[in-house]
Amino acid sequence: MSRLAGGAVLPLLLALGGGAWALQWTAPDGERSRTNPVPDSPAARQKGRALYQKHCASCHGDKGKGDGPAAAFNPGQPPDLTDAELQGLITDGEMLWKITVGRKDGVEVLMPAMTDKVPVEEDRWKLVLFVRSLAVRP
C-alpha cells in the first residue's frame, strides 16, 4: 500500500490504535525516500533477526506484536510490526531513520536510538529487512 495523501492519514492513524504514535512520528522527506541498499537474503535477514532479538524484542516482542516485557513501561505502545497495512505506510528509509534516531517525548524515551547499539548502517538496513519479514500478508 502506498502512502495516503492529505487528510486521509489522520483518520487512519486514529483507527490504528497502538501504532498511531509511530505514524505520527515521520521522517524528513530525504530520509523517507531512501531505499534499502542491502539485498534481501536469508543471511541478511538472519543478521537482522539477531539484532532484533538483542535490541528490539524487549519492547516490540519476539514476534513483533508490540507485546515485549518492557512494553508496559513505555509511555507509548510499541506498534504491531506484523500489521502489513501499518508497514505499508512506512517506507524503508523512514523505518531506518526511526531505528537510527529513536524518539523522545521530553525526557521520556519512547524508542531508543540504535546508533550506539547498532553502529553500522548496513546492519540497521538488515534490521529493516527482518522487520519487513514480520508483516503478516493476507
Image: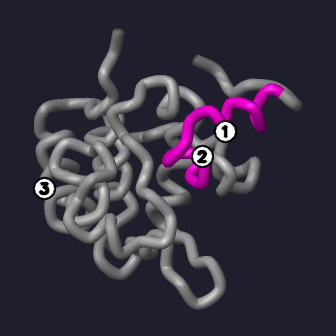
User: Residue at horizontal 29%, vertical 63%?
Assistant: 59
Secondary structure beneath disc 2? helix
Q: CA distance from mark 3 to mark 1?
A: 30 Å
Label 2, on which residue? 20
Q: Earlier in the sequence, mark 3 or mark 2?
A: 2
Is residue 114 visible in the rendered image? The answer is yes
Residue 93 at what x, y percent from top left? 55, 45
Asked if residue 18 lies in the magenta stretch, the reply is: yes
Residue 52 at what x, y percent from top left? 22, 56
Is residue 93 visible in the rendered image? The answer is no
| Bounds of the magenta segment | 8-22
Q: Amino acid at mark 1?
A: Leu
Q: Amino acid at mark 2?
A: Ala
Secondary structure beneath disc 3? helix
Q: CA distance from mark 1 to mark 2?
A: 5 Å
Q: Looking at the image, which residue sits at the far right?
A: 6
Residue 47 at what x, y percent from top left? 15, 51
Residue 62 at what x, y percent from top left? 16, 50
User: Residue at horizontal 43%, vertical 40%?
Assistant: 37
Q: Does the CB distance between marks 1 and 2 fall below 8 Å?
A: yes
Q: Nearer the viewer, mark 3 or mark 2?
A: 2
User: Residue at horizontal 45%, vertical 70%?
Assistant: 111
For residue 4, side relative to residue 78 (left or right): right
Report which quarter residue 56 is drawn in: bottom left
Neighbour class for label 2 at 10 Å: few (<14), some, many (≥20)? some
| Closer-to-camera residue (46/17) | 17
